[in-house]
């Protein structure tokens, strides 16, 4: 989905009581933006399917707070609407008669967004509008069912001063000049997506197509002052997109726009319209891994989406490891191992202060943007790859995506796919790495005696793990022999014959295991 927060600006609590009596089918938002005020005028057409006969339902929308920011619903229309109340962060809508199928409602509202739609100035002092919805911040500026497991198609019809270019999800349907130096831009996304990746951006942009090998248009939208550097940097998206198509499967969307923006994140994987921090444009392509991460999210996070946020690693861990695989294919195994060692160090440091599992029910959603969701999630996939082999692992990834594209999944769903494809029982693997906190803490001792190498491994952590462990034995000339043992107990001793005393012994020489530890000569 996204790289971790550059700066955590806010902490957001997550309420699991989302409005789940409806399944939204389609949103159509009419928005008016202005240079004279931060107040927006909005009209929302919401088409929803009722899961059960209901006499009322609710949508998420933050009402006006004491600071004057928030949205006020002025009126609601619809053939079956009896009335409404706006209370807290909900719009409660009463129906004339119980509905049990698809119904439509139109909401007319206005206000100054406190969040979700960032209205500010960019680094050059130019006014910009960028939505930034993750995780559940869309309802700060649009009425919606703001949950990751309610996907819908969406249209944005944005009226703004004519000097702005407007970008959004999907395909541009219309761009028309209006009176008073204003312009209407209409974008439509026909593939159902979560509200967290619905987006608009309005700014003065330089725009270019940068694709040469991708099956869909790939564009760069950058500040005019960064035109040369931005087009060069974002052109990387073309062959990155092609790589993931080859590795995972067909790209679902009809375009890929790469946008320099005011997102509070390093990057935000809005569906086919990725917003990158404005600092991502450097002219030297140092943001290659960031671009790969956000493009990987178009498969994992946008199309195959976590059912709820405790399973965020299905987005972030996947995007992180898909980036690792891309960098491996681009620059070789040494690059992969370097990235994995850095990621392992981050997990170790994180787990020294935070004792939580990867599948985590923490209520402050911004707290999930951590090394468990990203780096540990990536390491779990790396170890699964090592366990299954490259061919089977890739088949698991492809099968999981094919099965859950356009819908939502939990961790056990991915486990079931991996078991079916591989034919292996993987519950112990998933349990220890994803559902319990921590990682193996290893103390190793070795000795050489009578042409035998003796190895003792102790697990020092709170939990006892089961895992394969490689031992690298180096001679005086630096030649390495690798032995593999399987650890199942708190303390175990192994031995195998060798002809002379090692010059050096190392744990995990091929960077295959997530662990903290060391080995010493006894």
Image (spheres, grey):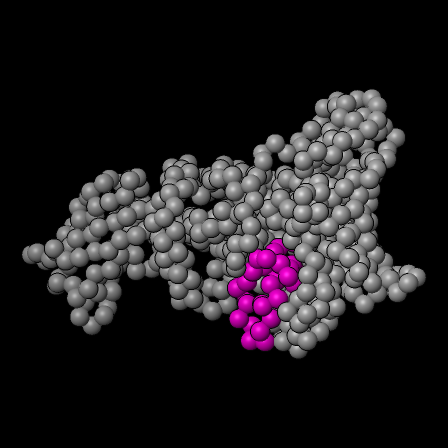
Q: Is there any visible trace of residue 270 in the rendered image?
A: yes
Residue 194 falls left or right of residue 107: left
Q: Is there any visible trace of residue 399 in the rendered image?
A: no
Q: Nearer the viewer, residue 35 or 401?
A: 35
- Residue at (42%, 38%) from the top-left corner? 435
Q: Is residue 279 magenta?
A: yes
Residue lying at the far left in this picture: please name it. Answer: 450
Work out whether 413 lies above or below 224: above
- Residue at (78%, 51%) from the top-left corner? 40
Q: Is residue 12 magenta?
A: no
Image x and y of residue 387, in percent: 39, 48
Q: Quadrant of the C terminus?
A: bottom left
Q: Nearer the viewer, residue 279 or 403?
A: 279
Label count reads 0
Residue 484 falls left or right of residue 160: left
Residue 280 falls left or right of residue 97: left
Residue lying at the far bottom in this picture: please name it. Answer: 228
**Magenta residue span:** 261-290
Q: Nearer the viewer, residue 180 or 453?
A: 180
Work out whether 291 lies above or below 349: below
């Amino acid at each position: 989905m996204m790289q971790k927060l550059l700066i955590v600006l806010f902490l957001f609590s997550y309420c699991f009581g989302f409005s789940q009596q409806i399944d939204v089918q389609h949103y159509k938002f009419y928005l008016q933006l202005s240079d004279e005020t931060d107040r927006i005028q909005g009209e929302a057409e919401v088409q929803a399917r009722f899961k059960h006969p209901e006499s009322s339902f609710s949508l998420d929308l933050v009402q006006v707070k004491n600071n004057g920011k928030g949205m006020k619903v002025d009126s609601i229309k619809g053939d079956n609407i009896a009335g409404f109340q706006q209370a807290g962060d909900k719009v409660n809508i009463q129906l004339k008669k119980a509905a049990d199928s698809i119904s439509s409602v139109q909401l007319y509202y206005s206000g100054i967004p406190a969040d979700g739609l960032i209205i500010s100035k960019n680094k050059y002092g130019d006014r910009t509008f960028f939505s930034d919805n993750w995780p559940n911040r869309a309802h700060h500026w649009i009425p919606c069912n703001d949950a990751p497991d309610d996907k819908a198609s969406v249209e944005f019809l944005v009226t703004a001063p004519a000097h702005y270019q407007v970008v959004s999800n999907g395909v541009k349907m219309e761009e028309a000049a209006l009176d008073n130096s204003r312009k209407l831009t209409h974008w439509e996304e026909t593939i159902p997506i979560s509200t967290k990746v619905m987006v608009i951006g309005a700014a003065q942009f330089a725009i270019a197509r940068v694709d040469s090998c991708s099956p869909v248009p790939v564009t760069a939208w950058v500040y005019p002052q960064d035109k040369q550097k931005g087009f060069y940097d974002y052109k990387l998206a073309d062959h990155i997109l092609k790589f993931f198509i080859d590795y995972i499967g067909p790209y679902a969307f009809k375009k890929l726009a790469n946008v320099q923006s005011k997102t509070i994140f390093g990057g935000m994987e809005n569906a086919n319209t990725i917003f990158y921090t404005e600092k991502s444009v450097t002219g030297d392509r140092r943001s290659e891994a960031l671009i790969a991460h956000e493009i990987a999210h178009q498969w994992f996070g946008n199309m195959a989406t976590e059912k709820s946020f405790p399973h965020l690693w299905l987005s972030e861990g996947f995007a992180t490891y898909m980036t690792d695989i891309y960098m491996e294919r681009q620059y070789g195994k040494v690059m992969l191992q370097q990235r994995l060692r850095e990621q392992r160090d981050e997990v170790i440091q994180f787990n020294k202060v935070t004792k939580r599992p990867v599948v985590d029910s923490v209520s402050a959603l911004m707290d999930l943007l951590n090394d468990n969701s990203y780096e540990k999630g990536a390491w779990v996939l790396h170890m699964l790859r090592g366990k299954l082999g490259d061919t089977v692992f890739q088949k698991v990834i492809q099968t999981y995506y094919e099965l859950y594209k356009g819908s939502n999944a939990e961790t056990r769903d991915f486990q079931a796919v991996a078991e079916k494809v591989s034919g292996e029982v993987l519950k112990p693997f998933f349990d220890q790495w994803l559902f319990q906190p921590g990682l193996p803490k290893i103390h190793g001792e070795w000795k050489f005696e009578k042409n035998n190498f003796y190895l003792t491994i102790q697990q020092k952590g709170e939990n006892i793990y089961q895992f394969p462990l490689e031992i690298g034995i180096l001679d005086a000339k630096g030649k390495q022999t690798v032995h593999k043992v399987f650890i199942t107990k708190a303390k175990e001793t192994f031995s195998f014959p060798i002809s002379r005393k090692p010059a050096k012994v190392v744990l995990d020489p091929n960077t295959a295991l997530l662990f903290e530890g060391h080995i010493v000569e006894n």
